[in-house]
Image (cartoon, grey):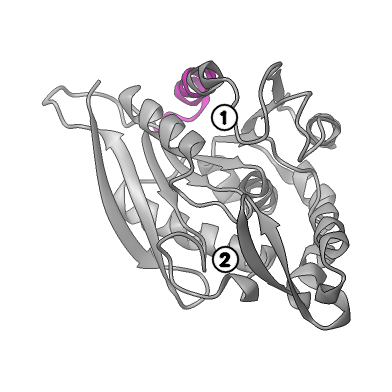
Amino acid sequence: MSRKSYRVNFPGGNGYRLAGIIDRPAPDGVSRPSPPIVVFSHCFTCNKDLKAIVRISRTLSEHGIAVLRYDMTGLGGSDGDFAKTNFSTNQADLSAAIRFANTELGRVTALMGHSFGGAVSLAHAGQLSELDSAQLKAVITLAAPSDTKHLAQLLSRRDPNIEKLGRGSVTIGGIRWEIERQMLADFRGHDLPAMIPGIKAATLLFHSPHDETVNFDHALRIMGLIQNAPGNSQMPSLIALRNADHLLVNAPEDLQFVAETAAAFLHRYASSS
């Protein structure tokens, strides 16, 4: 199936314009059921143009799935100051992206997130009302952490001045990022493990046992939190990516496998009809 991609921008959840790209099946005149509609959230300090996100999003659209990938506040092509953001602002931006996609594409039926974007997606899905839970049919994560506190600890260790002086910097992916104390405080203030059991949507977790950034134990914990939640009939699925790294760049074949498996999962669980 051919793909149509185009740039968009929309009001974010924190008073700034957010940049996005929509990858969707190109119209071909054939009548089909409404496709799964996905909002794809990127990792900490990443953006919508990360190779893995681009490849997966485009492949999904070629399999008949509409995807909005977007930049959170202060990252990529979006406005705002990254140092002023945190997990709360990330959640607000995801909510804004869903509102925009609902208007632009139709009712969002699935969330997908890489690393910290996966955590944001899990948090959103776990806090939905009963009505919204029925409309969100699937959640897919790639290398997602099971909590937000571990990132605060990691950043604090990398530069103690963040805590001592209120502002510091860390180098991630060869880029120096300014970090404020408020970001770490916000990360510590969220209880993601308490939110995850509220997820009612079908859930698929991709994670590498060799991930050196987010340990595989996080995937096992997420799986346990969902499957052991009282009254939850959904059994999450976990796929171990044996040769993958955190950014899915070491083995190009992993990207195709993830995209095609995700497409099958979304058609099975997140079709609108």
Q: Which residue is mark 1?
A: 249
Taking the spot 52% from the left edge, 18% from the top edge, the residue there is 261
What residue span does the magenta drawing correspond to?
257-272
Q: Residues within 10 Å of mark 2 (few under 14, many from 20)?
A: some
- Residue type highlighted by circle 2: Ala
In which quadrant of the rendered image does the C terminus lie? Answer: top left
Q: Which residue is mark 2?
A: 92
Quarter of the figure with residue 223 = top right
Question: Which dot marks residue 149?
Answer: none
Residue 40 on image: x %, y %: 49, 44
Taking the spot 59% from the left edge, 30% from the top edge, the residue there is 248
Q: Image height check: is 180 above or below 94?
A: below
Residue 178 on image: x %, y %: 66, 71
> Residue 239 versus residue 270: which sits nearer the camera?
239
Viewer-side label of 2, 1:
1
3D distance between C-alphas at marks 2 and 1? 29 Å
In which quadrant of the rendered image does the N terminus lie? Answer: top left
Q: Secondary structure at mark 1?
A: loop
Residue farthest along the left direction in this orientation: 29
- Tell me how many marks there are: 2
Most common SS among magenta residues: helix
Q: Residues within 10 Å of mark 1 (few under 14, many from 20)?
A: few
Taking the spot 46% from the left edge, 54% from the top edge, the residue there is 98
